[in-house]
Amino acid sequence: MSESVEYRHLEELQGLEFLSASFQSTQFSKHTHEGYCIGVIEEGAQSFLRTSGQFIAPKGDIILVNADEVHTGESAVETGWRYRAMYPTPEMLQQVSADFFSEKGVTPWFPQAVIHDEGLAAQLLILFDLFAVQNNHLLKQSLFLSTLALLLQRHGKGRKELRHLSQANEKILRIKEILAFEPEKDHQLQDLANEVNLSPWHLLRQFKKQTGLPPHAWLIQVRLRKAICLLKQGVDISMTAQLCGFSDQSHFNRHFKRTIGCTPSQYLMSRMY
């Protein structure tokens, strides 16, 4: 199976990101996405780590990763895997889930990483085929919403957001906000620990416990998120690497490929509107 990656950003669906790809030797390191990952395996099988464990998704199954959830990805078979996936933002799912959950402040959440649902998988593939068609905005928007609604109805849960976070949770949230506000900065562990009145060692333990990644790895993720935004805006790759705090373009390329599955230049070439 040849390796290929194609990204699309659908403006008619609030900029929804859509991926069509095939991989054989590519291995994704631990990473996160701002949006949920909802995909269908079309050939081969994928193995991936999600918070709750290691999973294998064969042909025809649906893969689900929650927003900001640490995960990996690699082939489970010698021939690789081919899949298509969309990445709706938390806001998109909250708009749909408002009709499912009576309480306010409920965040959609998918407890299962791999599901076998032939009817839903078929509907997702129809939706993905429609993404390649020009115009037909009303049909796309209608099928997109109805598909998300069906997914939530059959396989979604609602997590009530805590009104009163524990002191430890508040401190880690503060560190995440600091890193997200200035991802390009060369942050110091002691400075971050001082910010939330923790020892550096305690900060490391608490941060990884709550996010699944140590602070330096989380910083790479927020730098990549900023980089994707800049690339979409037309900033060239070299300047993007510099503005996002990567030591050089090679460093940027390496982390980008291990998380996105292609280099920044391949990402730009593959994007279609």
Image: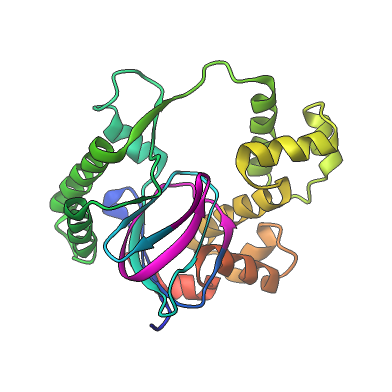
Asked if residue 163 lies in the magenta stretch, the reply is no
Can residue 160 be seen? yes
Q: Principal SS element in the magenta part?
A: strand
Residue ranking furthest to the bottom: 2
Numbered label tally: 0
Q: Which residue is rendered at x = 24% and y = 36% of the image?
A: 153
For the residue pair 87 and 162, the one nearer the viewer reads as 162
Residue 47 is covered by the magenta coloring: yes
Q: Residue at x 22, y 56 (%)?
A: 121
In the image, 23 versus 17, the foreground residue is: 23
- Residue 190: image location, x then y, percent: 86, 39
- Quadrant (top left, top right, bottom left, bottom right) of the N terminus: bottom left
Q: Is residue 236 left or right of residue 203?
A: left
Magenta residue span: 29-55
Q: Is residue 82 above or below residue 100?
A: below
In x, y percent, where is residue 85?
34, 59
Instruction: Specify the quadrant that holds the C terminus.
Output: bottom left
Q: 100 above or below 110?
A: above
Where residue 232 sits: x, y (%)? 47, 61
Looking at the image, residue 65 sits to the left or right of residue 200; the answer is left
Q: Is residue 104 left or right of residue 118?
A: right
Using the rendered view, name the quadrant where residue 31 is placed.
bottom right
Residue 166 x, y percent position in the rendering = 64, 20
Residue 155 sits above or below residue 44 on the image: above
Up the image or down, 145 lies above or below 72; here it is above
| Rendered image quadrant of residue 130 | bottom left
- Give the side of residue 135 with respect to residue 180, left or right: left
Q: Report the front residue among 256 and 166.
A: 166
Which residue is pictured at 77% across the width and 28% down the height? 196
Q: Is residue 16 visible?
A: no
